[in-house]
Amino acid sequence: MSEARQSANGHHTPYSGLTPAVILDALDSVGLRGDGRLLQLNSYENRVFQVYLEDGTAVVAKFYRPGRWSNEQILEEHEFSAELAEQEIPVVAPLSLVSADGASSSATLLGERRTLAQVACESDTLRFAVTPCRPGQSPPLESMADLEWLGRFIGRLHAVGARRPFRTRQTFSVAEFGLAARDRLAQSHVVSPQAALEWRAAADHALAAAQDVFARTDGLQMIRLHGDCHRGNVLWSDRGPHFVDLDDAVNGYAVQDLWMLLSGDPPTSRRQLQALLEGYRLFADFDDRQCALIEPLRAVKMIHHSAWIASRWEDPAFPAAFPWFGESSYWQQQAQDLRDQLRRIEASLTP
C-alpha cells in the first residue's frame, strides 16, 4: 500500500495507504502481533493508533508524517525521552524493537536503542515507533495544588533538558517560527486577497514587537523543551501528570513550556503562573525575565499555527477539521486578534 498517493489535483495525500492491514503488518514485522483491534487516537500531525495484541496487552504505534522530521531528529527525540525515563520522570519513552522472523514484511531498525522502525510498503517507506499504553485524562488544573504538581514535573524535565542542547532538532527563534511562518503562509495563497493586506499588516506589527522584546531579553538560557506544552498534551492519572509524546521537542526558553498552561484573565493567569513556578523552582532555576516573553510567544504561536494548517491543507483531515480556514471572516478575525495581541505586548512593556 502507498503511504502517500497523488490526489486528483496532483498533490500527494499522506497516509492514504495506511490501512489496518498495513498497520498490523508493520507491527508484526517487529514481533508485536495484533489481534485485529485498532483504535485511532487524536493526532493531526502523525497517525497514532492503540493496537491490541494477541497476548492481551496493548501498545501505541505512531506513524510519522513523511518528510517532517529526519531520522536523526526523531532519534534525538527518542534519546531525550529515554534520558527522562532513566531519571524516573514520567514520560512514556519508545520501546526498543526487534525484527521478527517470518513476518510478511521486514523492518529496518534505527538508532542505538532501535526505537525507530522503517518498513517498505510498495514504493514507499513507513516510519513508526511504539510505546507502552499509558492511559490518562485531561489535567485537572483548577486548583493551585495541581498546578504546583505540574510545575514540579516540568521543572524536573527542564533540569534534564538543561544538560545539553539538541544537535539536530529545531531551535526556537522569532525569525524561524514567526517571520518564516508568515512568509510561508503568504506564499500559500490560502489567505483571501481581500483579507491578505489587513492580515499581513497586523502580523508584521505583532512580529516586529515580538522581536523587540526578545532583543531586550537577550542572553537567556536555552534548553531542551517539550515544545508544545498545552493542556491537551498533558495526561493525568492517579500518579499525576505525564507526557506520552515529545514530537515537537525543541531548543528554547523554559517559559515556552509554561505559558500555554495559563488561562483566564490577567490576574488569574498570574496566579496560575506563580503556582506553576512554586513547583518548578524546586527542581530548576527560572529567570523572571522570561515572563516578558509570554505575550510575544503568543503572537508567534498564532501565526505559526495558521501556517501549520496551511502547510497541511492537502491532508484530507485538515479541511474536515478546520472548514472555516479559507473564509475571509477567519482572516479578518485573525488580523483583529493580532492587533489585540500587539496591544498586550506593548502593555507588558509598560513599567
Image (cartoon, rainbow, N blue to C red):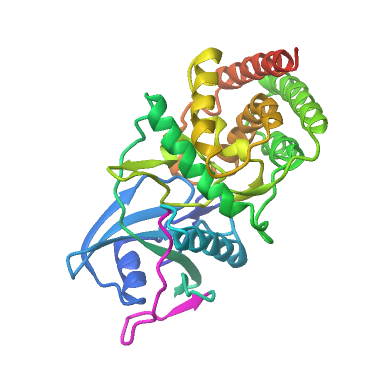
| Residue lying at 56% horizontally and 21% vertically, measured from the top left | 330
Picture mark count: 0
**266 in magenta:** no
Q: Quadrant of the N terminus?
A: bottom left
**Taking 265 as reference, is 168 above or below it?**
below
Residue 221: percent from left, percent from top: 72, 44
**For the magenta stretch, what is the residue range?**
91-110
- Residue visible at 28% across and 60% down? 51
- Residue most extreme to the bottom: 101
Q: On the picture, is 23 further left or further right than 288?
A: left
Residue 263 pos. (x, y %): 48, 22
- Foreground of the two, 236 or 240: 240
Quarter placement of the C terminus:
top right
Query: Taking the image as drawn, is residue 314 in sight?
Result: no
Residue 242 located left or right of residue 343: left
Q: Is residue 90 left or right of residue 300?
A: left
Q: Residue at x 58, y 55 (%)?
A: 68
Type of secondary structure dominating the magenta stretch: loop
Question: Who is closer to the viewer here, 167 or 273?
Answer: 273
Q: Is residue 241 visible?
A: yes
Residue 131, quarter of picture: bottom left
Residue depicted at x 34% and y 65%: 23
Q: Position of residue 245 (x, y in %)?
A: 45, 52
Quarter assignment of residue 28:
bottom left
Image x and y of residue 281, in percent: 56, 38
Q: Is residue 178 above or below residue 222?
A: above
Compared to residue 58, the image places residue 298 above or below, namely above
